[in-house]
Amino acid sequence: MRENLHRFFRAARGVGVHVSPAESIDAMRAVAQVGISDRAVLRDALLLTLAKSKDEKLALGDCFDLFFSQPEPRQDQPETDNDDTPQDADQPPSSSDGGESQSPEGLGALAQMLLSQDRNAIAAAIASASGAASLSDIRYSTQRGIFSSRILDAMGLQRLRDDLDELTATNPALAERLRAALDALREAVRDTVSQGLALYAREEAENLRNEILRNAPLARIERRQVAEMRSLIRQIARRLRERYSKPRKRQRRGHLDVRRTLRRNAAWGGVPFLTAWKRKHRDRPKIVALCDVSGSVAQVSDFFLLLIHSLHEVVDDVRSFAFSSHLIEVSEILESNSPEEAMSEIMSKVGFGSSDYGSSLVDFEKEFMSTLTPQTTVIVLGDARSNNLDPRADILRRISDRSKRLVWLNPEGRLAWGFGDSEMPRYATFCSVVRQCATAQQLERAVSDIVATYQ
Amino acid sequence: MADQKASTSIEAVENGLAAQGYIASRQIATAVYLSQQIEKPILVEGPAGVGKTELAKAIAAWRGMKMIRLQCYEGLDEAKALYEWKYAKQLLYTQILKDKLGEVLGGAQTLHAALDQLHDFGDVFFSKEFVEPRPLLQALEQPGGCVLLIDEIDKSDAEFESLLLEILSDFQVTIPELGTVSAITPPTVILTSNSERDLGDALKRRCLHLHIGFPEQRLEERIVESRVPGISQTLRRQMVGFIHEIRSLDLKKLPSVSETIDWARVLVLLQASELDTEIVKDTLNVLLKYEADIEAATPQVTTFIAKAARSNVFG
């Protein structure tokens, strides 16, 4: 049982539940207390000791169900003792099912087991053979074949083949039965391996996929990856939220807190040995995001707006604007719709035009300049390609003057700035920070930096 | 057979809590049983009003132990949670004992000798007599054990969590001047959290993690039955069914068990025998705490009542 629990812990890590050694010890102790006869109680006990959040509980519950559902060769009762070692496989099976017991002596253990149709023994043998073949090391789906054959070898396939050859000559009917049983066995082993893959390899596969996605250029994401990208962005937003959601107190050395100092030093008759200082909450973040949604950068800004809006719990005050040839406010649209609907609505209102930074900035100055306060961080996301129209950098200077910081995120690489119709160098002089921002990872870093300045 | 014993003990926990008017799901009972057996605190998370605090009270009442409650809030620190020196008493005693001190020190010839003598009873002022125990220390000092409820831990600062680690894993606290105080009998510790912020891994690792969500319909009916005995069975079914429909809406704050119980009481007071649109609309403010929520739910009331009545027929 202990062996099984260890494998279960590995599977649990695979689905993203963090199981530390201390937690596995707790789980062991808990299992020792509740026993293993009642599956529901065992499940509860493991969920209580290992999973530490609601999401983890869901994931671990699924993992438990998958782990303890034994793939069966035939219709079978689900409860099998897979922690028994298959010693009983050596016993002559003849006595169990009376009529069919003409199996000749001298066959290998596996052949006898198959012929006797002893399901429990077969399941146990598969389980112990998968242990011997270290099935829990499986990582990629391409390894399924090799692990299947390893398990079959460990079960004694070689001996079975010899037996089969022999029987074909001596007892064809029995050989036929054995062959059918062998096919069933292969299937069962294949199921076991698939289950193992689902249990142990998920983490690896997911990590790999996410790593690739994080570093893929956002502008070139394929349609089928968009949904995955969205969930990755949500993950990033959650991580940023966890990191920054608690308004941290920062000490402001300089102002003495007289009351607390006196209280703290009462033991010394009020002689201030220890001083206490007043503390101050840092500014609440305020963000104004301006997003270019013209064709060339639309997809990046799509993810960017999504990220900013998933961050609502950290940043109470976000206003987002989208522009290509003119500028509109989109905060409302993003908040009240699902991401897909919001994006298509924004696109139908301002999207697909050729970008005109000058007139968009004029729009902003005319209507929304008052949203900027000395606490505001302004983020502009765009490639600064203004189709040779007047860039109106003077407005950007005024925006910069009014706000705390002006951050420009450009999905194009640094090399392209300033060439063609790119106005980046001219705009850059008024920005506090200019960064390249083409992948999810760069996006995360950029937003993380912005939020961090308020901590 | 250990297994046999475990499942009967879990049942015993369920019955024990039920006797105190707390209807526990099997998962809750398992958690309570395990926390006793392997001496671990339980961290209870879940939405407001599903009976997290109530669980601690029920355990204390069932086991006949004292309940010590520590309500967490931002800025809670050691001095309010663990112990504090009784400064005033210390000062007062030094004043009163001034003459005595003079006497004792009077015999000393040199400054050194005086200092030595002072050392001999210098510790007197930092002894147990002058420690004001706060909830955490009190809990350790209960000879018969107790239930320690650390309520809404998510409201406290992250630093406070670290303070708890020692008491949670070893049931002891260290007071620099006195040394380590260990629990006479390890208390049953219940921590509750509304998930307002994520707790640290170190804290979570030391606890059994129990998530209490909204109960299933049957369980909720039993809870109402035990809390509001005067309510008729039909009405109970209907109202619980209705509440389950309400919870499927996208609301600011979903009604939880405490609201269900309040509503049941209100309905009994109004002597309702059956749900109808009129009475539901009049009492919706018991269930929903935001004007916007009430507005969102009002148009659905009639359909929900019909649904609840229908499920009543089949259920």
Image: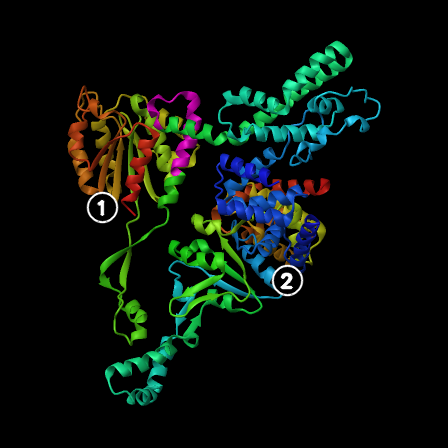
Main secondary structure of the magenta stretch: helix
Question: Is A5 a magenta residue?
Answer: no
Q: Front-most of A209 and A111?
A: A111
Give residue B186's position: percent from left, percent from top. Answer: 54, 62
Q: Which residues are magenta?
A: A215-237
- Residue B280 vertical placement versus B176 (above, below): above
Residue topped by disc 1: A374
Looking at the rendered structure, the kind of residue marked 2 is Trp
Q: Front-most of B28 and B50?
A: B28
Q: Residue furthest front?
A: A106
Name the residue rendered at 18%, 34% in the picture: A395
Give residue A18's position: percent from left, percent from top. Answer: 47, 41
Q: Residue furthest right?
A: A99
- Dot 2 lies on which element? helix
Q: Which mark is residue A172?
A: none
Name the residue rendered at 40%, 61% in the picture: B76
Give residue A240's position: percent from left, percent from top. Answer: 36, 40
Looking at the rendered structure, the kind of residue marked 1 is Pro
Q: CA distance from mark 1 to mark 2?
A: 58 Å
Name the residue rendered at 84%, 23% in the picture: A99
Question: Is A236 a magenta residue?
Answer: yes
- Specify the subunit that label 2 lies on: B
* Category of crowding for the residue at label 2, using alpha-carbon neighbours closer than 10 angstroms: few (below 14), some (14–19), many (at least 20): some
Is residue B230 in sight in this rendering?
Answer: yes
**Count of residue discs:** 2
Give residue A185's position: percent from left, percent from top. Answer: 66, 21
**Which quadrant holds the C terminus of chain B?**
top right
- Residue A251 vertical placement versus A38 (above, below): below
- Dot 1 lies on which element? loop
Is residue B239 in sight in this rendering?
Answer: no
Residue topped by disc 2: B62
